[in-house]
Image: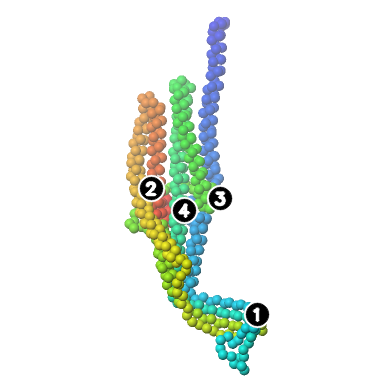
Amino acid sequence: MQIDRKTLVVAVMMVAFTALLRPAAVRAQQAAETAEAREAREVGEAREAREAREAAGVAISLGEAVRRLESSNPSLHAADWKARSAEREVWEARGELLPTLAASGDYTRYEESNLVTPMHEAPSPKSDPLEFEEEIYTAAAKLTVPLVNLPALSKAQSAKDAARAQAAQRDTLEQRLIASVVEVFVQAQQIDDSLSLIDAYLEALGERREELSELEREGQVSSARVAEVEAQMNSRRAERLELVGLREDLTFRLGELLGRDEPVTPQSVSFSKPELETRIGATGPKLEEARARLSAAESKRTATAFSFAPTLEGFFTQTSRSGPELDFSSEWSGGLTVTIPLFTGGRRAARWSSARADLQAAQSSYSAAKLGQSRALRGAARTWEIAGERQRLIEQAVANRETSVSSMRNRYEQGRTSLSDLLNEEASLLELRMNERRLLYDQVLAFVSYHQTAGDLSPELIQSLTEE
């Protein structure tokens, strides 16, 4: 059989053209497979890293993290020591109201002989003759008992109020740290939920891309549709990488809160919808701190006013004197001492002005703290209420959008709508689902913020936010 030249040329051109197209198709298929492999590898590596951290013992539950705060957070340790220091200052101030006992001694060498004994009584030539020496040793013990000391009394009250303010400041810090730990777990769980939704969406897009790639090879759809799906997938991959980075940052933040110089992974936790019971007139540690500082400023002003008052104290002294032979002879004395401050170079007047200014500042700070607490409580309660209302609306929107997406998928399969419209509808459904979960976490954070302001956050209360 003979093949004409024209037929042979056409056959050769078809073979060559097929050979040219095959590498492009192979490269496109390999690129798609590479993207899938890269995505699968990233997901697998993230999962393996998390499992490795949990196996190494650096993953922690919410309840355990809150319980460990008191023993591991360095800022809370510093606040504890400051509170103890303030308590010791109270005892120091009270010490001015207690009796004091002091001993003293001295050695003196005189140019001329000086009287050693008897110190004050009349001499007896036979039994107690006069004794003169150039070197004299003196020892004394004195007991002083404060009887009336109004400035010291006010100072003790001021120190007590300052200690109360320091303790309230420590409680404020503890409440803030507990709220920060809960916020880390809430944000981590929110990221995990978003990653799960994105992964499911990427999986669905991957299946659609495979279907379109098969149809493209058969010549039934254009490559633009495949590129459109790829663009949507790349956008979600970029969003996913950002969320993974934020998740890693949270592990370092949790480690810092727990006083560890390493990442600590928050374990997954299922939060339940909290029920908030508002309380009228709730007082928190910030308001208590401002009230205590106001009381301390009032006590300081009172102490400054009492600095103009006289003080009265009793004393008893035992004095011994001796010459070089160290044969001491002793006598005692006792009495009362009245001190009346007359002029101190303007120090009391300046102290009075300073005390008045401190009192005005404390009053303004207390008013600001009272207004701030009222606003924070109302704001947290309102945020919780609005988040609940929005969540109910979003739930209805999700149900409606799911129906819309299902209908649009049917129309797309029938060729009655475009792929772009379907992808946009599915992306909107994904955003609604993510917002639905986000509003639950907004309610949890509002609940925590309210109780943080009220000052009653505790491990037991935090545990009530989680589902068993």
Disc 1 designates what residue? Answer: 111
- In this view, the residue in front, 46 or 333, is 333
Residue of label 2 = 443
Q: Nearer the viewer, mark 3 or mark 1?
A: 1
What amino acid type should be assigned to the residue bearing mark 3?
Asp
Marks 4 and 2 sit apart, C-alpha to C-alpha, by 19 Å
Marked residue nearer the N-terminal end (1 or 4): 1
Judge the density around disc 2: few (<14), some (14-19), many (≥20) Cα neighbours within 10 Å: many
Relative depth, front residue between 195 and 71: 71
Percent across and percent down for residue 223 are 46, 23
Q: Neighbour class for label 3 at 10 Å: few (<14), some, many (≥20)?
A: few
CA separation in Å, label 1 and label 2: 89 Å
Q: Residues within 10 Å of mark 4 (few under 14, many from 20)?
A: many
**Pointer 4 and pointer 2: residues touching (CB < 8 Å)?**
no
Please say if 201 is above or below 102: above
Q: Looking at the rendering, in which quadrant would you find the N terminus?
A: top right
> Looking at the image, which residue sits at the far front?
112
Using residue 255 as the reference point, say whether residue 400 is left or right of it. left
Inter-mark Cα distance, 4 to 3: 17 Å
Q: Earlier in the sequence, mark 3 or mark 1?
A: 1
Residue 261 image label: 3
Relative side of 386 to 45, left or right: left
Of circles 4 and 2, the one toward us is 4
Say which residue label 4 marks.
177
Q: Amino acid at mark 4?
A: Leu
Residue type (three-letter) at the residue carrying disc 1: Glu
Residue at x 50%, y 63% (from the top left corner)? 85
How many angstroms separate mark 1 from mark 4 (CA)? 72 Å
The picture places residue 395, in percent across and down from the top left corner, at 35, 41
The correct choice, above or below, for 189 with respect to 419 in the image is below
Tags 2 and 3 touching, CB below 8 Å: no
Mark 1: give few (<14), some (14-19) or many (20+) Cα within 10 Å.
Answer: few
